[in-house]
Image (tube, rainbow, N blue to C red):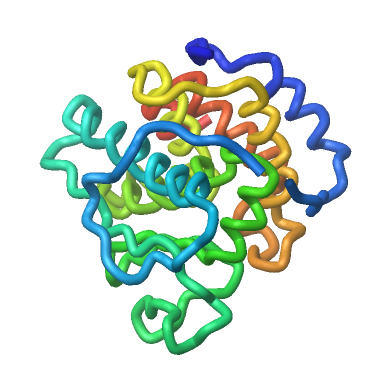
Amino acid sequence: MHLPRRLPAALALGLTLLATAACDLEIAPAGAAPRGSTAPRIMMEETLDDPEFREDLRTAEQVVNGFWARHWSELFTGAYRPPTVVGLYNGRDPATTPMCGDRPLERNNAAYCPAGDYVAWDITLMRNGYARGDAWVYLVIAHEWGHAIQDRLRRDLVSPAAELQADCLAGATLYGAAADGAVRFEAGDEEEIVRSFRVIGDDVPWTKPGDHGSAAERLRFFERGGDGGVSACFRTT
């Protein structure tokens, strides 16, 4: 189905549910869409036996990068430069884990690395999340791309609550891409997003207390971007 410009009741209801929900790490698979990414790509893409998973990763990169390529000049000065897509890495294997400056990326995490201007996501994190539904990969990739966008902006535009701002930019990206006709949300995708935020609030091993916000806060900022677009992510209230 086409996504309406205002966020559906599923996300608004999700905000209420998240206020009392416990973290739920149960799991099980999902769907597909368009193809490819014009962003530069390096490193290995692990051989996987799930073509839908690989396709959804490529599609999410294409959708997110395409949104910023189309709209950058309407929003900001200068030319848009996509980050390099390192993509999947195996955080359990130090020999192949990408370095960011003098440190390897963390296991079970996804990251934008300013030192290398690249985005990457641990295969275990992405596979486990994808088992909950394909909206997971779109959310994670749009969030990390949001950090790449922050790195291209004047410092005074980047919120001290940078993680929540990146969630807002993720919402603006995915709902903006849907408004452009670049992606369709399937039935149940909004519910998958709500469930995803239940998993990636502060009470999970790969976040530091206070650095990302609670699940309800994160969904609220995602909703702000989805409802108000990119400019809403730079409001001070």
On the image, which quarter does residue 40 sit in? bottom left
Residue under the image location 60 percent in, 61 percent down: 125
Q: Residue at x 44, y 88 (%)?
A: 95
Viewer-side residue, 234 vs 113: 113
Between 166 and 189, the one lying in front of the other is 189
Measured as percent of width and height from the top left, residue 30 is found at: 62, 39
Instruction: Find the residue positioned furthest to the left.
Output: 78
- The reply to whether residue 161 is in sight is no
Decide if residue 221 is in sight here: yes
Q: Taking 204 as reference, is 2 above or below it?
A: above
Of all residues shown, which one is farthest toward the bottom? 95
Q: Residue at x 58, y 27 (%)?
A: 223
Placement of 96 over or under 124, stated as above or below: below
Who is closer to the viewer here, 37 or 54?
Answer: 54
Q: Position of residue 100 (x, y in %)?
A: 37, 76
Q: Is residue 205 left or right of residue 140?
A: right
Q: Position of residue 82 (x, y in %)?
A: 23, 49
Q: How many tags in the picture?
A: 0
Asked whether, in this view, residue 136 is left or right of residue 33, the answer is right
Left or right, 10 with reference to 67:
right
Residue 168 x/y as whole percent? 50, 36
Q: Residue at x 54, y 76 (%)?
A: 91
